[in-house]
Image (cartoon, rainbow, N blue to C red):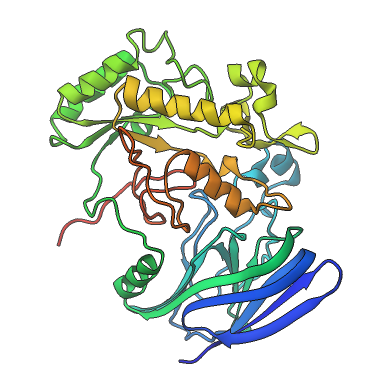
């Protein structure tokens, strides 16, 4: 079926450039802009779907409720929560709520970076090929049969050619459309095998210690196979953000001893980290207040976990050096094979007039030596390559928040 993408680029001076192009295969919309600040970059597509179709919109991060919707579905926001709770616990910081306006109407769904429409086994996939100019925001109105697309780039300065949209559009089976998208992005899986193992989080949450991990390791020997993962989750650190030493009360022998014990049991050793955030009671906040990202002169709070936690500012070279030092210690000095990276969205709650929110996130991923979902960066092959969990919304093991599958389909 032939579809047309109608687009418009508006600047703050009132200039507006409009055009249209067929929506099929790889679509690259380029618009010349001279010394202007962007007001809005948007597009629409007439897209009628049958009553039996299902709609999926990729969520901003893994706590974003992202099911398959029917035609009457609507994307959840925070409107159902009392206003004072939203403010007191900074609940709007856990997603895109602070920069995306939610319509709260039946039949309207919203997401970032990619979406699909499924009728039985037939998929229509529309995904971004490059998010660097700004996140690609999708909004589908099933009542009108219109897909709206917008770049998250308001206020950015442009002088030259603007990459308004870079999209991949394909119809076919699930494997056909997604394999085609990944090929266009030159994305290759790290492995095609399910990651099987144990995480201490769902058994003990933060209530872990050397004795508890030793006990769990004994139990894992009866359930896991050699080479499977045994991962120590949140609770090993004195405070979130203070990563260079473990909690001496909980792990008096240090984490090198824990990693060695996991290896001796025949498993890969994993450790939880949230590299771009720190809780309010951490030493990082006390000793390095200049490391915190500021917004309107105040540290940016990402939510209420651990009594409240802040974003670290990756524009500060000392922050970058600290994150690199932490990874070196965990992977090389302590000997862990894998890190579970959490709350990554904290690296980029905002962009600037010269760097989009998404481009900042890409830069954060390069600090971690991981290729972000929608860039063509290559994996840094260091002494021990960084690995993360694989999940249904990630390629090459990259996640924006909590990358783990609670279940894996049984083999057929």
Residue at the far bottom in the pictured view: 2
- Left or right: 47, with 34 as reference point: left
Indicate the quadrant containing the N terminus: top left, top right, bottom left or bottom right: bottom left
**Of 330 and 93, the residue lying toward us:** 330
Q: Is residue 395 above or below residue 263?
A: below
Q: Is residue 192 above or below residue 318?
A: below
Rendered location of residue 142, percent (x, y): 58, 79
- Left or right: 294, with 113 as reference point: right
Quarter-wise, where is residue 12 in the image? bottom right
**Of 365 and 201, the residue lying toward us:** 365
In percent of the image, x 63 and y 29: which residue is there? 308
Q: Is residue 50 above or below residue 179?
A: below
In percent of the image, x 42 and y 29: which residue is there? 327
In percent of the image, x 77 and y 32: which residue is there? 298
Question: Can residue 229 be seen in this snapshot?
Answer: yes
**Of 292 and 384, the residue lying toward us:** 384
Rendered location of residue 168, percent (x, y): 46, 74
Residue at the far right in the pictured view: 13
Question: Can residue 56 be seen in this snapshot?
Answer: no
Rendered location of residue 224, percent (x, y): 16, 35
Q: Is residue 355 above or below residue 127?
A: above
- Left or right: 131, with 263 as reference point: right
Quarter-wise, where is residue 253 in the image? top left
Rendered location of residue 177, percent (x, y): 36, 74
Q: How many marks?
A: 0
Quarter-wise, where is residue 45 in the image? bottom right
Indicate the quadrant containing the C terminus: top left, top right, bottom left or bottom right: bottom left
In percent of the image, x 28 and y 32: which residue is there? 337
């Amino acid at each position: 079926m032939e579809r047309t993408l109608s687009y418009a680029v508006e600047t703050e001076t009132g200039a507006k450039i409009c055009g249209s192009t067929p929506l099929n295969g790889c679509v690259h919309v380029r618009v010349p802009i001279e010394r202007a600040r962007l007001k809005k970059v948007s597009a629409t597509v007439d897209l009628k779907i049958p009553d039996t179709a299902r709609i999926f919109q990729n969520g901003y991060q893994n706590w974003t409720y992202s099911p398959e919707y029917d035609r009457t579905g609507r994307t959840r926001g925070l409107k159902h929560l009392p206003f004072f709770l939203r403010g007191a616990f900074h609940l709007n910081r856990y997603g895109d709520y602070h920069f995306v306006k939610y319509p709260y109407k039946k039949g309207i769904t919203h997401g970032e970076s990619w979406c699909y429409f499924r009728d039985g086994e037939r998929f229509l996939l529309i995904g971004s090929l490059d998010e660097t100019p700004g996140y690609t925001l999708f909004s589908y109105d099933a009542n009108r049969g219109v897909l709206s697309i917008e770049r998250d780039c308001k206020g950015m300065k442009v002088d030259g050619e603007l990459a308004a949209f870079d999209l991949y559009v394909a119809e076919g089976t699930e494997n056909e459309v997604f394999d085609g998208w990944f090929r266009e992005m030159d994305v290759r899986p790290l492995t095609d095998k399910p990651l099987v193992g144990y995480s201490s989080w769902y058994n003990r949450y933060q209530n872990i210690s050397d004795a508890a991990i030793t006990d769990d390791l004994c139990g894992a020997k009866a359930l896991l196979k050699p080479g499977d993962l045994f991962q120590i989750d949140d609770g090993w650190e004195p405070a979130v953000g203070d990563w260079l030493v473990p909690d001496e009360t909980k792990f008096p022998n240090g984490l090198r001893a824990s990693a060695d014990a996991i290896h001796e049991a025949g498993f890969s050793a994993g450790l939880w980290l949230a590299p771009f955030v720190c809780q309010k009671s951490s030493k990082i906040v006390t000793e390095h207040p200049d490391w915190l990202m500021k917004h309107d002169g105040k540290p940016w709070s990402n939510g209420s976990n651990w009594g409240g936690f802040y974003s670290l500012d990756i524009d500060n070279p000392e922050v970058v050096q600290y994150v690199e030092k932490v990874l070196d210690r965990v992977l090389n000095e302590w000997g862990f094979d894998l890190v579970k990276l959490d709350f990554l969205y904290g690296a980029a709650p905002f962009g600037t007039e010269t760097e989009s929110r998404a481009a900042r996130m890409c830069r954060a991923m390069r600090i971690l030596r991981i290729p972000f979902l929608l860039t063509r960066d290559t994996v840094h092959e260091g002494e021990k390559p960084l690995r993360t969990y694989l999940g249904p919304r990630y390629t090459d093991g990259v996640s924006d928040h909590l990358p783990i599958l609670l279940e894996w389909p049984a083999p057929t």
